[in-house]
Image (spheres, rainbow, N blue to C red):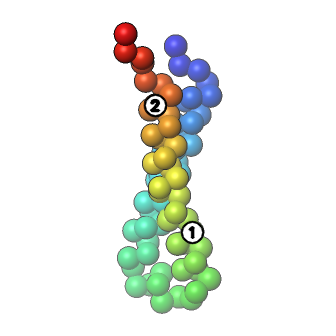
Amino acid sequence: MQTQKSSRLLATAVILFGIGMVASIALLFPAVRDTGTVIVTIVYVLAMCAPLGFLLGLIFALLSGRRSR
């Protein structure tokens, strides 16, 4: 059976990965890049959520996997 903690881990991983991907795509638009250094820095830091979400998803997959006999 799934525990509540592991489903929260998956939800957190998906949300972080989604935020990171949206921020990465936003960095491609010239309107975001030309506005100022503060906004670009914030979007860049948010883009770092994608690898973090991927790592959490990988940890979830390893923890929820079944052992082979």
x 53%, y 39%: residue: 11
Instruction: Name above or below for residue 18 compared with residue 56.
Output: below
Instruction: Name above or below for residue 67 compared with residue 25.
Output: above
Tag 2 and tag 1, C-beta contact below 8 Å: no
Residue at numbered disc 1: 45
x 38%, y 76%: residue: 28
Return the x and y of residue 7 as percentages of the image width and height.
55, 29
Regarding residue 19, the answer to whether it shows in the image is: no
Residue in front for this viewpoint, 48 or 62? 62
Regarding residue 10, the answer to whether it shows in the image is: yes
Instruction: Name above or below for residue 9 compared with residue 28.
Output: above
Q: Secondary structure at mark 1?
A: helix
Return the x and y of residue 47 as percentages of the image width and height.
50, 65
Return the x and y of residue 43 as percentages of the image width and height.
54, 72
Instruction: Name above or below for residue 15 compared with residue 22.
Output: above
Q: Amino acid at mark 2?
A: Leu
Q: Residue furthest top?
A: 69
How far apart are labels 2 and 1 at the CA level?
Answer: 27 Å
Q: Amino acid at mark 1?
A: Val
Q: Secondary structure at mark 2?
A: helix
* The C terminus, quarter of image: top left
Residue at numbered disc 2: 62
x 37%, y 15%: residue: 68
Q: Is residue 50 left or right of residue 9?
A: left
Of callouts 2 and 1, the N-terminal one: 1
Disc number lying in front (2 or 1): 2
Return the x and y of residue 45 as percentages of the image width and height.
57, 68
Q: Residue furthest front?
A: 69
Instruction: Classify mark 2: residues with Cα within 10 Å, few (<14), some (14-19) or many (20+).
Output: few
Q: Is residue 44 left or right of residue 31?
A: right
Q: Is residue 65 left or right of residue 35?
A: left
